[in-house]
Image: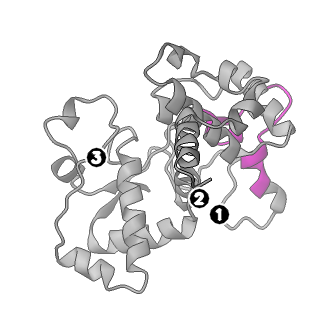
Amino acid sequence: MTLRIKDWDEHYENNRTRGLKQMNWVPLPNSFGDLYTEMMEQKDGPIIYAGWVLLVLTASRCHPRGTLVRGNGRDHNSTTLGRLCRTQKVVFEKATTFCLKIGWLEEIPSKFPENEDNPEIPQEGAENPQEADIEWKGREGNGMEGKDSIVGQVIEFLNQHCGTQYKPSSKKSAKLINARVKEGFDYVAFMNVIQKKTKEWKGTEWEKFLRPETLFGTKFEGYLNQTTTKDKSFQEKVKEAGFA
């Protein structure tokens, strides 16, 4: 089943956001009603609420908005949400369970039949360790990668973060990503590079280079370890102030 934020259009869209192709912000309600109180009275109330906010932020970037669907059309789960938001999947396990209970979330029929997953998608709690590694390592050989391999994960994150439409089936992109994986870089490293270069290049003449062949090429390690301009500026100010 696909998870959807209930009454998304009513609570999380307005006349400004409805005309946007991609949302970079969300009009989040600031009322503290009975359901909010019930949530915060739970033992893990603050964790559940943090997970709920992350669910809303994620749903705002999905298509269609308000649903928790990945770029490849498959449903998000606690594992993929945790990876995307860079937090523990237990946060989403607690949040989705409670929010379904109080009606903030709802389930709708999935685009993909239940349990009809791609062979390379590891099931949560898989007993075979090799199966659990497939999603991260990808399939190497002919360069054709499954949508849920690390190639698919990276391309999906790039598209969501930069508003691009690169295909995970691209042999060229798969070759570059797999080359970096062979060098020992993981999914988090790819996320960091995408985020750093987007922050640096978005809105400049360099924005056109937010593409797989530039980001995931031989300069990948340099991009990963670079200090952003804003960080340098802050460090210089600290030094000038005599704190370093």
Q: Amino acid at mark 2?
A: Thr
| Of residues 114 and 240, the one drawn nearer to the viewer in this rendering | 240
Residue 53 on image: x %, y % = 36, 60
Mark on residue 214? none
Answer few, some or many: residues within 10 Å of disc 2's Cα (few below 14, many 20 plus, some between 14 and 19).
some
What residue appears at the point 24 percent right and 80 percent down from the top-left corner? Answer: 37
Residue under the image location 71 percent in, 27 percent down: 216
Q: How many marks?
A: 3
> Mark 1 touching mark 2, by CB under 8 A?
yes
Q: Earlier in the sequence, mark 2 or mark 3?
A: 3
- Residue at 60% across / 32% down in the picture? 155
Name the spot of residue 226 as percent of width and height, x first. Answer: 68, 35
Of badges 1 and 2, the one in the foreground is 2
Distance, label 1 to label 2, CA atoms, is: 8 Å
Give whichever of discs 1 and 3 has the lower sequence position. 3
The image quarter containing residue 124 is: bottom right
Q: Nearer the viewer, residue 32 or 130?
A: 32
Q: Which residue is mark 1?
A: 124
| Residue 152 part of the magenta segment | yes
With respect to residue 127, does 207 lie above or below? Answer: above
* Secondary element at image label 2: helix
Residue 31 relative to residue 4: left or right: left
Mark 1–mark 3 Cα distance, whole angstroms, equals 30 Å
Kindly state the secondary structure of the residue where label 3 is placed.
loop
Q: Which residue is mark 2?
A: 79
Kindly tell me whether residue 211 is visible in this rendering: yes
Going by the image, does 147 lie left or right of 201? right
Question: Looking at the picture, how far across and down is residue 244, in whole percent?
Answer: 62, 53
The residue that disc 3 covers is 26
Are dots 2 and 3 in contact, CB under 8 Å? no
Q: Which residues are magenta?
A: 132-155
Amino acid type at mark 3: Val
